[in-house]
Image: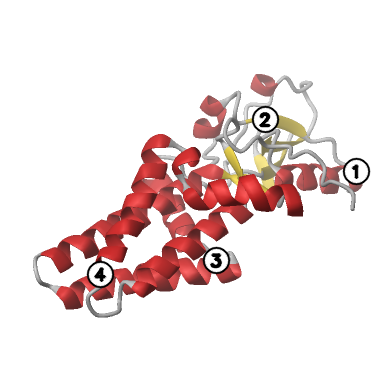
């Protein structure tokens, strides 16, 4: 059996992106702990889930048990899955840890109904995300980015000269990350459609990502010669 190709994103070094299968395995692990904590007398399992998320957030992916399992055992067997922006995933983990710590505190002071409600919410959302890929915390990230001033909407104007484009010409501008597989797929689709996208690497130019409201990559826009954005392509 041939070995899967070498992953494009290093699991411990390329922290701006992540193989999308790893978060889903972690969601399965955390969701199962949260669900099990609803049984009478075993609510400390919610604290265990909160602790695992907190350790991974504090010390990185090497402290994430599900990530170690995925990157150490499953990815070498299955190959790399789709690579995605890691920021929404990290934010979703922060939300999950916060809610599970709140559930733990509620149980500790005797409000077991409230504790079960909070843990049940995490269990439902995490297991649903593991099964479908729909991440409620990632949607919250977009709202959080909006409040921080990263709008995530289509920019109205792009300074083409700032991007090194030839003056007096229309352009397609794509905000991308070199290790994002969705970004690479979008570049290929744009090329097949006859476009030559001007690539803006958000890992090297985070200032432009903030300036133009790029909360998640990929994003591509068609820009007129005067810099006004005609439409969003992705």
Residue picked out by circle 3: 130
Seen from the viewer's position, the closer of residues 107 and 145 is 107
Observer-side mark, 2 or 4, equals 4
User: On the rendered structure, is 176 left or right of 117?
Assistant: right
> Which residue corresponds to the image point at 84% horizontal and 49% vertical from the top-left?
189
Task: Say the numbered circle drawn on residue 194.
Answer: 1
Q: Residue at x 70, y 38 (%)?
A: 174
- Kindly indicate the quadrant of the structure image that contains residue 177: top right
The tag earlier along the polypeptide, 3 or 2, is 3
**Residue at the far left in the pictured view:** 109
The answer for how far apart the CA atoms under marks 2 and 1 are is 19 Å
Earlier along the polypeptide chain: callout 4 or callout 1?
4
Give the number of the mark in front: 2 or 1. 2
Looking at the image, residue 62 sits to the left or right of residue 195; the answer is left
Q: Nearer the viewer, residue 209 or 31?
A: 31
Q: Categorize mark 3 by other alpha carbons within 10 Å: few (<14), some (14-19), many (20+).
A: many
Q: Position of residue 161 (x, y in %)?
A: 68, 20
Q: Which residue is mark 4?
A: 43
Alpha carbons under labels 2 and 4: distance apart: 47 Å
Q: Is the residue under label 1 in contact with that under label 3 (CB below 8 Å)?
A: no
Disc 4 and disc 1 in contact, CB within 8 angstroms? no
How would you rate the neighbour count of disc 1 (Cα within 10 Å): few for under 14, some for 14-19, many for 20 or more? few
How crowded pointer 4 is (Cα within 10 Å; few <14, some 14-19, many 20+) is rated as many
Earlier in the chain: of badge 3 and badge 1, it is: 3
For label 2, the crowd category at 10 Å Cα-Cα, with few meaning under 14, some 14 to 19 and many 20 or more, is many
Inter-mark Cα distance, 4 to 3: 22 Å
Residue that carries the numbered disc 2 in the rendered image: 200
């Amino acid at each position: 059996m041939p070995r899967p190709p070498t992953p494009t994103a290093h699991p411990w070094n390329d922290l701006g992106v992540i193989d999308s299968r790893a978060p889903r395995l972690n969601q399965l692990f955390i969701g199962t702990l949260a669900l099990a904590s609803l049984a009478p007398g075993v609510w400390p399992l919610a604290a265990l889930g909160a602790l695992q998320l907190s350790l991974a957030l504090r010390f990185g992916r090497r402290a994430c048990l599900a990530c170690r399992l995925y990157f150490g055992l499953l990815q070498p067997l299955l190959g790399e899955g789709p690579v995605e922006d890691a920021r929404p995933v990290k934010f979703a983990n922060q939300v999950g840890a916060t809610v599970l710590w709140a559930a733990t505190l509620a149980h500790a002071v005797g409000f077991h109904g409230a504790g079960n409600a909070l843990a049940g919410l995490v269990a439902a959302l995490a297991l649903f995300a593991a099964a479908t890929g729909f991440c409620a915390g990632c949607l919250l990230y977009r709202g959080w980015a909006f409040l921080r001033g990263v709008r995530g909407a289509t920019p109205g104007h792009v300074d083409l000269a700032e991007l090194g484009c030839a003056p007096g010409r229309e352009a397609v501008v794509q905000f991308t990350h070199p290790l994002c597989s969705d970004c690479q797929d979008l570049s290929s689709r744009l090329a097949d459609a006859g476009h030559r996208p001007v690539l803006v690497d958000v890992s090297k130019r985070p200032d432009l990502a903030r300036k133009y409201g790029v909360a998640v990559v990929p994003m591509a826009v068609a820009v007129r010669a005067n810099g006004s954005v005609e439409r969003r392509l992705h």
